[in-house]
Amino acid sequence: MHHFNVYNKQHVLSLTTLRRFETKLGERVQVINNAKNFEQSLSETNAKYVLLGIPEDIGIRANSGVGGADTVWLPFLQSFLNIQSNDFLSGDDILLSGHFDFGEIQSLVEKNANNKDEKLEAYRHAVITIDEEVEEIIKLITAAKKIPLVIGGGHNNAYPLIKGAAKGLYKAGIIPLSQVNCINLDAHADYRPVEGRHSGNAFRYAEEDGFLQKYCVIGIHENYLPQNVWMDIVNNFFMDCITYEDIFIHEKKNFTQAVAHAAGFTEDNYTGIELDLDSIENVLSSASTPSGISVLHARQYVTFAAIDTKAAYLHICEGATKLANGRTDENTGKLISYLVSDFIKARTDIE
């Protein structure tokens, strides 16, 4: 984990606004006790959730997308650590481990690539390095029987999350095979062909490499579903999707029924919970949409998924506070803090 920065308590408190007569999550969350022995620190903590950030947009740029997903981690963290610690969410069960910094790799690409095609190829090669490091830390966390809470970054990181969780849960003796299921609230399937790693083909790579067993997409937009991907989903017994149009335009299922269907489809195994913020209407992301689900639906999704699945991890990705094209929205980090807290609260209620 060459590019991973481990936090200490002083770092956490520096982002926490202390107020008399109040207690914030930043005062209660745990940190890694020994940065030199991450695995041992995980085994020694009683925290159930391990929070980490992957603030990068390399995978998005490798998919010819708009950069900016590297900007949301710190605003999220500042918002999350300043949530009130109370009977609804105390923070004691959360270990804030740190974040990846792949800025060095991005600088090398920008410096050495001479044209657009070279840059695209270099970014896709760089994603492989990200895959390897993210997979390793997720494997350690899940092998320690903790649930990773991961804030991205591009959706390219779904591949190492699936792979790392499958390997970690298998190593811990929790699952009989190195495979997990996945449900994804997303406007896109991210199941594009194997053409070099990027944010648009994480689930294809995970499935072809044998780590993804079942995959269900909720809210996919028919306008952005390539015909070849649609046919692959239709003809694969282990894949399913419910389009945005079927839920909200044709009303074949309501949103709650759609989430319940996805949970039922994947109930036979541990399941990664994915939420791409480009599925939410007008949220700043590399593929922002004027027609999407509401924030309320997103909060319901993580809540219902936390309750109705055997969660392997939570991954919230593609959000930004500032895009490379200059657009800004300071609320994205706060939105993610609501989603993460909803997930933990829902699981706390059933434990």
Image: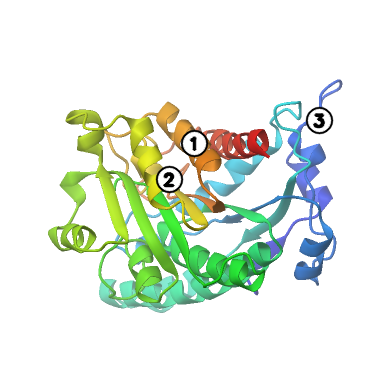
How much space separates mark 1 and mark 3, taking CA atoms?
Answer: 32 Å
What element does badge 1 sit on? Answer: helix
Q: Are marks 2 and 1 in contact (CB under 8 Å)?
A: yes
The amino acid on which the numbered mark 3 sits, given as a three-letter code, is Leu
Q: Which residue is at a point 41% across and 57% down the rendered structure image? A: 155
Residue 331: percent from left, percent from top = 50, 32
Q: Which residue is at a point 43% across and 38% down the rendered structure image? A: 328
Q: Tell me: 110 left or right of 137.
A: left
- The residue to which callout 3 is attached is 18
How much space separates mark 3 and mark 2, taking CA atoms?
Answer: 39 Å
Q: Which residue is at a point 81% across and 52% down the rendered structure image? A: 46
- The residue to which callout 2 is attached is 263
The amino acid on which the numbered mark 1 sits, given as a three-letter code, is Phe
- The residue to which callout 1 is attached is 304
What element does badge 2 sit on? Answer: helix
Looking at the rendered image, the disc whose residue lies closer to the viewer, 3 or 2, is 2
